Amino acid sequence: MRLLVTGGAGFIGSNFIRHMFSSHPDCEIVNFDLLTYAGNPKNLRGVDAKPGYTFIRGDICNRDIVMATLSRFDVDAIVHFAAESHVDRSILDASVFVRTNVLGTHTLLEAARLHDVPRFIHISTDEVYGSTTGDSFREEDILTPSSPYSASKAGSDLLALSYSMTYHLPVIVTRCTNNFGPYQYPEKLIPLFVTNLMEGKKVPVYGTGKNVRDWIHVIDHCRAVEFLLERGVPGEVYNIGGGNERTNLEITEKILQLLNQDETMIQYVTDRPGHDFRYSLDCSKLRKMGWTPRYSFNDALGETVEWYSRNEWWWRPLKK
């Protein structure tokens, strides 16, 4: 199996590469990454010595380097993780999100079409559906994104699916809930809160902390993508979730408990503009195909907190 993985130095991408080399030792992986602030070569320490691994530093918006890469490497699939993904940053400046998430995805799709790539996995997010206080979202539900980030991802989803419909490019779109685990940049909730507490700082909780998210360990997400590489149907969308809906306050309290801290370390802050109340996915489509998560939430969160506690060398330089 030969894969081109975009954004492979980021949190989910690097875990996916590690997972694929673990489950498919003979696979070949080209990691195509621009190494923006969230792309860290340290995420791939050890992997970079494997004979089947190649790293190319490049921008997915740069047509010439994308085309040259696909001309050089005859790949069986593109797994497209590369994206700007932090909601708060998108509120401050949406332009980079539109450029990377929409125009960058278009560049990859067009290159994949011209090179007859056999499979294209487009990694998206549950945030494209918007908020719900009722039923969980199904794959066929309308997209009502709230933030510039989620709007840019919704646009890239529809663009990817249009390439399936118009050009018969074998595209699969995945929409996953909140990931957590090792190597996650410490701007996201769990690593931010863990590292803040380790530094003796308070943790910032938006509004009342009652907003609800579903959480999945990053390796379970990687397993789902691997599963769909082998069994997914081109032109289809698949929701991926862990079945672990928790309020932000519940997550905060669990982290406090694991680090022997109390609620005096919580600092409530002004809520995010347009903050979605609840994300919830119906993942029965994927589960009926035979995929289920392996990690229990409590065990996975405990392991994640322990990882950040043992790997200050990795995250401390990122918070300076």
Image (cartoon, rainbow, N blue to C red):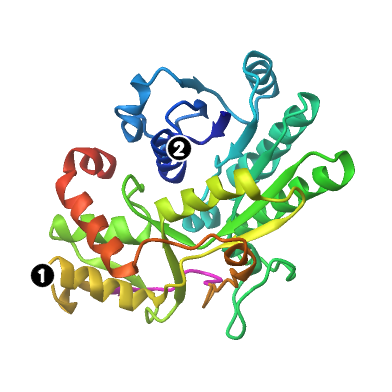
Q: Point out residue 274 in the picture as x, y percentages from the top left corner.
A: 56, 71
- Residue most extreme to the front: 290
Sequence order check, earlier mark of 2 and 1? 2
Q: Nearer the viewer, mark 2 or mark 1?
A: 2
Query: Looking at the rendering, which quadrant does residue 149 occupy?
Result: bottom right
Q: Mark 1: which amino acid?
A: Asn
83 falls in the magenta region: no
* Front residue (pair 205, 231): 231
* Front residue (pair 318, 166): 166
Q: Residue at x 22, y 54 (%)?
A: 195
Local packing at callout 1 (Cα closer than 10 Å; few below 14, some 14-19, many 20+) is few
Q: Which mark is residue 20?
A: 2
Span colored in magenta: 268-275
Q: Which mark is residue 260?
A: 1
Q: CA distance from mark 2 to mark 1?
A: 35 Å
Q: Point out residue 156 in the picture as x, y percentages from the top left corner.
A: 70, 48
Q: Residue at x 37, y 34 (%)?
A: 40
